[in-house]
Amino acid sequence: MILFCEYAIPEPNRETFRSWAAARPELWQGGELMENVTQPGVFVEIWPVADESAALRKQKERLDGRSDWKQIEAWVKGGAEGVRVWTFRPIIPRG
């Protein structure tokens, strides 16, 4: 399973966000932060999770938890409501 976070950061704040993220590698441990190639400013976070319970914990941490995450809401288009989070489960086993 994965927890998938998506948000847009407008151009005036993009470099500030990138610098902020790069200075905090501990926030991204276990996950990946990526920017859309064809739509600059659209970012995704991909977090592998063991099960739905772990996904809910990560989602709560990501949306309601650590103050470190709250800081980016000032840069995200739409603020806190602009951070969208989904959980996906595989439908076809790997192999």
Image: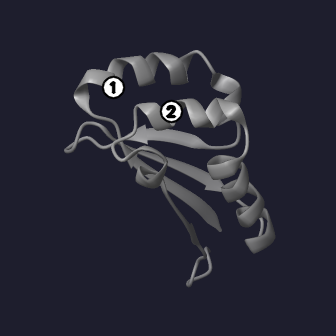
Indicate left or right for 82 with 55 as reference: left
Left or right: residue 2 compared with residue 21:
right
Q: Position of residue 76 (x, y in %)?
A: 39, 39
Q: Quadrant of the N terminus?
A: bottom right
Q: Where on the picture, by quarter, is residue 15?
A: top left
* Badge count: 2
| Residue type beneath disc 1 | Arg
Q: How is the image coloured?
A: one colour
Left or right for 89, reference 20: right
- 26 lies above or below 85: above
Q: Position of residue 91 (x, y in %)?
A: 56, 84
Residue at 78% over, 63% down = 54
Picture coordinates of residue 93, whole percent (x, y): 62, 80
Front residue of 11/45: it is 11
Q: Position of residue 37 (x, y in %)?
A: 25, 41
Look at the numbered disc 1 and give the secondary structure of its residue. Answer: helix
**Residue picked out by circle 2:** 72
Q: Quickly name the residue at label 1.
A: 14
Task: Tell me: 6 left or right of 10.
Answer: right
Residue at (53% x, 58% y) in the render: 4
Amino acid type indicated by mark 2 = Ile
